[in-house]
Amino acid sequence: MTDDRLSFPRPELRHRTARGAIVNGIFLAGGEGLAVLQGLIVTILLGPRTIGLYGIVTTTAMTIVALKRVGIDEAFVQQSEEGQEEEFQRAFTLELVLASAFSLVIIAAAPIVMVVYGETQLLALTIAVSYLPLAFALQSPSWIFFRRMDFLRTRILQFIIPVVSFAVTVPLAATGVGVWSLVIGPAVGNLTGAAAAILVSPYKLRLRFSAEARRRYFAFSWPIFVTALSLLVLQQGQVLAFNLHGGLEAAGYITLAFTLTRYADRADQIITTTIYPAICVVAEQIDTLEEIFLKANRVTMMWAFPFGAGFVLFAPDLVHFILGHKWQPAVVLLQGLGAAAGLQQLGYNWFSFYRARGRSAPQAVESAVLVGGFLAFAVTGLILWGSAGFIWGRLLATACVLAVRRSYVKSLLPRVELVWLGLRGLAPVILASVPALALRLALWGGSRSAGQAIAEIVLFLAGTALATWVLERGLLDEMRDYMRRGSLEPLPDASGNDPLPAASA
């Protein structure tokens, strides 16, 4: 039996999903690895002030772009209308219209940003990145492959962008182009990615206006717009707050901390991207959703929690041995945002389970709580106690978000308990930290050498891997079996029968 949204028999869904996670992981790790390497290289070459300048531009542009990302792609994946080529064209038309509008918004925002921050260079830089919404809209053919769970083709199209961006940005930065290297490189990468997507699209890109489709997509998308607006307030707000508090260099410190620690969500991005089309297929089977949620989050925490802990333990070494002493004020921000980013990944993909059932509003509530906590606790903490106060405020805001998230998860998936899930995910990190900290205490005194720092990192990574293998061996073996033998059990059939075993913690 073949599902009308899939290009393969439905009983293969487990195997395709597991294999898709591997494909997504490889390509995303490669792309993000290039992005991190590019970020470190240009950080060393350009310095805090230039990075702060670009941080203002990219935060402004990307958060405005985020407002455009109102879930039209996810609504396209979730729908099951007749005539998929026409449906794609209707969705693409809406995306392109929104992209055009938001490109104009970025242009209009350019003089405002220049006045707010008092830097004349920001006018030209902000206008120069106004192409981004249109470039992303022209990459829409990747939605088609995503809906079909053709992850290899989807990721190849997306991988083109960081490869081309790296190849252009780094040489330009090294030859003295300065902040413009950070604009030109991504522009070439994104436009190349758009051209490749158009070239391989199985559907023609044409405009197809439909009032009914507009209403349908808007009903799904408006809560996602609220979420994007909340993230705009958070991301732009923290850069602005630090700029007002400590000047452009302070904005550079928070930009660096946010840029590096945001990679805590990459495992979740891999997993959520992989399972979303599958969740849409089994959206009415609560037992199945509970199993998917638990296992997906256990896998996610294998990355997110060690990643956050790594910044807490080794951010001073990153600054001392790699970035240089001029970045010393960023240490506490790297440690604090690393911890907050790791903790915030607990159950982070919960909203995908609601969206797969056509409910996107609950995430807007969580986002409102996040922004309220940020303004009430983090900004107030920065004003009263500086960077340390900001970090404690961010952690308190994260705790508020997790409380709201737990309530929504419990409502949809009654047998899932986020507290126990989080404790389970923290256990390998706590065990792995012991030998690294023991070595640090044993060699305490004077400045730490690079060799000692490397030894502690190796101990931490090895300890994390060993503890994870011991505590999560059953899940790892299950994932391996999915890859080796394909679908061990069929997913629910069209009649709604669910042969899967009950979800386990």
Image (tube, rainbow, N blue to C red):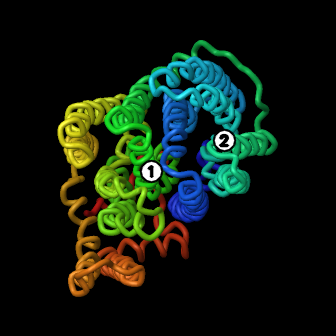
Which of the pair 367/61 is nearer the observer? 61
Mark 1, residues whose alpha carbon is within 10 Å: few (<14), some, or many (≥20)? many
Question: Which residue, given by chain and number where applicable, does mark 2 sit on?
Answer: 180
Q: Amino acid at mark 2?
A: Trp
Instruction: From the top left corner, tell me how far across and down residue 193 is, in percent.
Output: 72, 45
Residue 82, placed above or below residue 312: above
Q: CA distance from mark 2 to mark 1?
A: 18 Å
Residue at figure coordinates x 55%, y 19% from the top left: 111
Q: Residue 11 lies in what quarter of the image?
A: bottom right
The residue indicated by pointer 1 is 256
> Callout 1, which amino acid?
Leu
For image coordinates 58% across by 24% down, the residue present is 106
Residue displayed at 50% across by 61% down: 14
Q: Residue 123, percent across and down?
A: 60, 25
Q: Residue at x 23, y 72 (%)?
A: 430
User: How many residues crowd mark 2 within 10 Å: few (<14), some (14–19), many (20+)?
Assistant: some
Q: Quadrant of the C terminus?
A: bottom left
**Which of the two labelled residues, at mark 2 and mark 1, occupies the earlier sequence position?**
2
Tally the numbered discs: 2
Work out whether 351 lies above or below 214.
Answer: below
